[in-house]
Image (cartoon, rainbow, N blue to C red):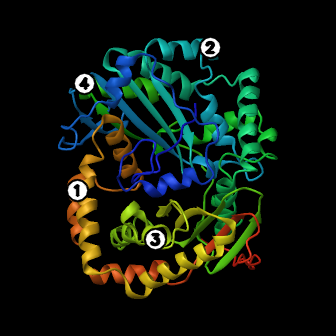
Amino acid sequence: MARQEAIGDGLSDQGYRAETRGEAFVNHFGTSLRISARRIAFAAAACLALAPMPSQAAAKVQHLISPGGIEAWFVQDATVPLIAMEYAFGGGATQDPADKSGVGNMVASLLDEGAEDLDSKTFHERLDRRAIELSFTSNRDHFRGSLRMLKDNRDEAFDLLRKAVTAPRFESADVERIRAQVLSGLRRETSNPTALASRKFLQVAFGDHPYGRQANGTLESVPRIDTADMKDYVRRVLAKDTLRIAVVGDVDPATLGQLLDKTFGGLPAKASLTPVADVEAAGPPQRAFIPLDVPQTVVTFGGPGIKRNDPNFMAGYVVNHILGGGGLSSRLYREVREKRGLAYSVNESLLWMNHSAIFIGTTGTRADRAGETVDAIEKEISRIAEDGPSQQELDEAKSYLKGSQMLALDTSSKLASALLQYQLDKLPIDYIDRRNAIVDAVTLEDARKVSRRLWGQGLLTVIVGRAPQAAAQPAAATPPTAKN
């Protein structure tokens, strides 16, 4: 089944705090609707999945190459008899046809609904009987999957995954059942202010670029998706040349290499992906208002961000923690919640993708205080753009980010997720060991420069709720600029 991706840094259903937050917000803002991970059938397996594994943080990450040439980052850990694997193929929702957004999401929701010689009911019974957790999701740049199992069930777990990725059945009854679930979720979104705000934000920021589309599809596009579309997506996207894998757990390298070859060896050698252009998000200031009769008004705000491979990324990451990523300690929280009582919470994050980057935040407030809330956010963002953080703020942020890293990688699943994201971000295999030194190297001048760069242009703001007096008419959007 499709699953929710981690939002990261304290906002995640998986909970790890690596530099994976950007990928997560891509998923949160417009990705999968039909999200439910495989529930572990036995209580013992559930306890093992959550068991802390303190040795992992210090464990050496190996670069494993299987006999068939499939590569993986691997941490061998026998603390508990559990194996966790995270993997991803390049492409994701950007490979959906322009008029059929949601194909990747449908594929993710159907891969475990029967494969090869197993129908849907039998496939799920096999998963449940062995307490195997298998799930998939299509985010904007990648088609991702997760596999977790007890050591004793590894052969069957990897074989079920092999069947799912190489021979999905896409039976008509299953397709229609999943389609109905997706459409039901999309209908619910039409009255969900957070969903409407995030959807509008991405449309304004990215226009006709694939990043501006809904990764989970629309009420118009999902009914048009047929089995041929999904089979074509699998053929084009699930291939070995873009495959990235991270494995953590109780398995030796030789055995893991054989399992990877059996599981993924039958996939095509090369993907056939539609090229995606780089794009600069539409520049602020802009404001849009969507009327919706709901008790609480939702405000989503943001603007162009900083890509993961930018030399100034870590400076931006640290100062963003000061502005809006630090939860109760952030500037936005103090100004909006503590000083003015305008909202229960407010958060803001950097979001990076393969072809663009933005920063994005959200809060909820009363309709008659929406204008005041936006003003408070704009003033605080303007202040940090002009003056940057103080030395004390910088020191405290660096201390927190260094200290929290290892605590956040305390289970096999969290560590595997982080190691996969590091690969997708093209970071070195020893990044965990090097990260704190990179954080330490950020100077006050670095932080001030990146603050001006990130937040000096103002905000792109979307307000959804009852018509507030302070809500301006939607401004004429400056279209995003594609880069060849």
Instruction: Please state the horizontal and vertical placement of residue 483, each as a whole percent of the image.
Output: 59, 72
Inspect the image, locate mark 3, and give the three-letter code of the amino acid beneath it: Leu
The Cα atoms of the two marked residues, 1 and 2, are separated by 46 Å
Left or right of 311? Residue 31 is right
Q: Position of residue 32 (x, y in %)?
A: 61, 43
Residue that lies at the very extreme toward the bottom in this rendered image: 386
Q: Which residue is mark 1?
A: 403
Task: Give the SS element for disc 3.
Answer: helix
Mark closer to the observer (1, 2): 1
Q: In the rendered structure, which amino acid carries the disc numbered 1?
A: Gly
Disc 4 and disc 2 in contact, CB within 8 angstroms: no
Mark found first going from the N terminus, 1 or 4: 4
Q: Which mark lies nearer to you, 3 or 4? A: 3
As drawn, 104 above or below 24: above
Quarter of the view holding residue 280: bottom right
The residue singled out by tag 3 in the image is 332
CA gap, disc 2 to disc 3? 49 Å
Q: Residue at x 53, y 41 (%)?
A: 4
Describe residue 462's horizontal placement relative to residue 24 as left or right. right
N-terminal of the two: label 3 or label 1? Answer: 3
Please tell me whether mark 1 sits on a helix, a strand or a loop: helix
- In primary-sequence order, the first of circles 1 and 2 is 2
Q: Nearer the viewer, mark 3 or mark 1?
A: 3
Q: Which residue is mark 4?
A: 80
| Rendered-image quadrant of the C terminus | bottom right
Real-space Cα separation, disc 4 to disc 2, in angstroms: 30 Å
CB-based contact (under 8 Å), mark 3 and mark 1: no
Say what secondary structure mark 2 lies in: helix
| Residue named by callout 2 | 121
Task: Pinpoint residue 156: horizontal percent, then vertical percent.
Answer: 43, 15
Query: What amino acid type is highlighted by mark number 2?
Result: Lys
* Residue 267 appears anywhere in the view: no
